[in-house]
Image (spheres, rainbow, N blue to C red):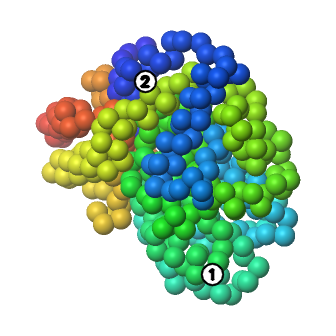
Amino acid sequence: MSNYKLLTPGPLTTTEAVKREMLKDRCTWDDDYKNVTQVIRKQLLKLAKVDEADYTTVLMQGSGSFVVESVLTTAIGENDKVLILTNGAYGERIVEMAKALKLQHVVYSAPYDEQPSLLEVQSFLKRDRSITHVALVHCETTTGILNPIKEIGEVVHSFNKTFIVDAMSSFGGVPMDLSSLHIDFCISSANKCIQGVPGFGFVIANTRALEKCKGQARSVALDLHSQWEVMKQDGKWRFTSPTHVVAAFAKALEELNEEGGIHARYKRYAYNNQLLRSRLSVLGFKAYISEELQSPIITTFLFPYKEFSFEHFYQEIKNAGFVIYPGKLTDVDTFRIGNIGDIHEEDILALCEIIENYMVVKNNEN
Ligand SMILES: *Cc1c(COP(=O)(O)O)cnc(C)c1O
């Protein structure tokens, strides 16, 4: 297998030190290991800028989607109803889960290149008094659009509803103060902006909101409340925990701290994203999402000309040492480049040079 750096939004490029942590086997019921889990739980609260008196962290085995499903089945009871806001595939996945779980739900779909309108959200909540929860994705990784969680959180709070945010691809890379955002359940995973490897996700939950969920889940393995009841005691995971992944994650958190915290990481991501967008724009690549709505996580680019072959482009870039991502839109031809992970200015510059050379060769052919 060739060696390349990932320019994908998770799994992503991790540091050597994070990978090295996985060379040791750890015992799940030993105090040292349980303590690693407890330290992680505390540090995540700090990153979310919330108080231990009001919020708690639950780690859950599986990829990010498992954790989203765990929150939905645990937090939304039989007599509840969730308003789901969508403008991309991950929002639509929440709808798919709501259907499978037979949750009462309503959907407000905005176009993929637009944020949901606050007035629409307000009117949904005014019209339908039976809505108890609102769920949305923060950074829609489908396109790279960033949704206005602060403004939506204010609306949700003014109606006194429970607020669920899929912050999978943004938590750790975009500064967030959960309590002032009125988020009750904030979901993310190990292999995104904290820059760990895949294997588990986490929920930063308002403790009072989580306490109310006892016995509500229609699942054993994905019962977030039961997982919390075991984990909060001494850091023991309910079922087999992904020990290597947890150790790598603890290291990744240390490195996030050393980098200067979420603000410093956000600055690196935003700078690299800006650099990528501006360099590629000179080469004729237009971004799908307008600059004001663009997240610093991942960018969707339109094909630069009609005969553009993504497969060929992808292969050439891969041969030169980087892996990029196909598009996820059905109506326009696009591809995506992520810039989260252990990716620095020199990587972006190297990538841009590879793409520049590709375009020079293509222009000479035409
Ligand atoms: C990555 C991601 C998920 C989870 O995807 P998995 O493949 O299950 O890890 C969910 N929501 C968003 C916005 C994501 O970026």
Q: Give coordinates of residue 2: x percent, y percent.
A: 38, 16
Q: Give coordinates of residue 69: x percent, y percent.
A: 70, 49
Q: Which mark is residue 18?
A: 2
Instruction: Give the vertical position of 34 relative to 165 (above or below).
Output: above
Q: Secondary structure at mark 2?
A: helix
Residue drawn 69% across the image and 62% down it:
209
Packing grade of label 2 (10 A; few <14, some 14-19, many >=20) is many
Q: Give coordinates of residue 224: x percent, y percent.
A: 73, 47
In this view of the protein, can residue 264 be seen by the observer? yes
Which of disc 1 and disc 2 is earlier in sequence?
A: 2
Distance from mark 1 CB to nearest ligand 1 atom below 8 Å: no
* Residue closest to the eye, 318 or 231: 231
Q: Is residue 105 left or right of residue 38?
A: right
Residue drawn 69% across the image and 53% down it:
71
Q: Is residue 142 left or right of residue 285?
A: right
Instruction: Give the vertical position of 10 relative to 322 (above or below).
Output: below
Q: Give coordinates of residue 214: x percent, y percent.
A: 82, 54
Q: Which mark is residue 159?
A: 1
Quadrant for the N terminus, please: top left
Instruction: Give the vertical position of 347 relative to 244 (above or below).
Output: below
Residue drawn 51% across the image and 17% down it:
22
Q: Secondary structure at mark 1?
A: loop
Residue drawn 76% across the image and 54% down it:
74
* Residue closest to the eye, 362 or 264: 264
Amino acid on which the number 1 mark rests in the picture: Phe
Quadrant for the C terminus, please: top left
